[in-house]
Image (cartoon, helix red, strand yellow):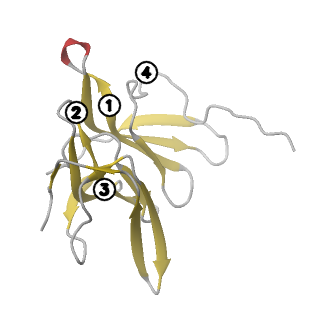
């Protein structure tokens, strides 16, 4: 069996700037992808956390790719890198934790991005969030009409809680 790689969401004028430590989440349905946050070049060439979101759509019939920045209304999560994001359904994703640069403060906040409504919502998980962390993984599991998110591993550290309701 031969395996090959190919660009799915190519460059172009609307493509987001280079970054590392971001998430690229495929929403249910498979044709919408959300790039969020990460670490990019800040003032003086130093690393800086980002808080922007970009949507990449792939047309199912032609495979044509289109990038667009996602302008949101209302409050949004603080800039971060090395966080996790998981798809909740075809329109929403959940973001947890991460690292604020350059001071390396770790976060334990939970936010939900609704791509269709173009808004973020701070979420308060049942039982409270886990300790602040970065460099971790996240999973979503649906059961009985409800979803469960699980966070594993990562580096705990100097944390600050954000977004609790």
Q: Residues within 10 Å of mark 4 (few under 14, many from 20)?
A: few
The N terminus is located in which quarter? Answer: top right
Decide which of tag 2 and tag 3 comes sooner along the chain: 3
Q: Give how far apart the Cα atoms at labels 2 and 3 are.
A: 16 Å
Residue holding disc 2: 101
Residue at position x 78%, y 39% in the image: 3
Residue holding disc 4: 13
Judge from the rendering whether residue 147 lies leftward or rightward of residue 162; answer left or right: right
Is disc 2 in contact with disc 3, using a CB cutoff of under 8 Å? Answer: no
Q: Give how far apart the Cα atoms at labels 2 and 4 are.
A: 27 Å
Residue holding disc 1: 39
Q: Residues within 10 Å of mark 1 (few under 14, many from 20)?
A: many
SS under mark 2: loop
Is disc 1 in contact with disc 4, using a CB cutoff of under 8 Å? Answer: no
Judge from the rendering whether residue 158 lies leftward or rightward of residue 19; answer left or right: left
Residue holding disc 3: 96
Report x, y in % for residue 133. Answer: 29, 52
Q: Is residue 124 above or below residue 60?
A: below
Is disc 2 in contact with disc 1, using a CB cutoff of under 8 Å? Answer: yes
Q: Give how far apart the Cα atoms at labels 2 and 1 are.
A: 8 Å
Residue at position x 25%, y 33% in the image: 49
SS under mark 1: strand
Name the residue furthest top: 44
Judge from the rendering whether residue 93 lies leftward or rightward of residue 73; answer left or right: right
Q: Is residue 38 above or below residue 125?
A: above
SS under mark 3: strand
Name the residue furthest bottom: 144
């Amino acid at each position: 069996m031969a395996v090959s790689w190919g660009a799915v969401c190519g460059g172009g004028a609307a493509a987001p700037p280079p970054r590392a430590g971001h998430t690229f989440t495929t929403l249910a349905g498979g044709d919408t992808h959300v790039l969020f946050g990460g670490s990019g070049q800040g003032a003086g060439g130093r690393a800086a956390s980002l808080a922007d979101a970009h949507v990449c759509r792939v047309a199912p019939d032609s495979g044509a790719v289109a990038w667009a920045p996602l302008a949101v209304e209302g409050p949004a999560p603080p800039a971060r890198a090395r966080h996790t994001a998981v798809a909740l359904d075809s329109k929403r994703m959940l973001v947890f934790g991460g690292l604020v640069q350059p001071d390396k403060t770790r976060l334990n906040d939970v936010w939900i991005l609704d791509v269709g409504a173009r808004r973020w919502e701070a979420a308060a998980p049942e039982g409270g969030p886990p300790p602040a962390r970065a460099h971790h993984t996240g999973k979503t599991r649906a059961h009985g009409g409800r979803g469960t998110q699980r966070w594993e591993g990562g580096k705990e550290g100097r944390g600050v809680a954000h977004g609790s309701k």
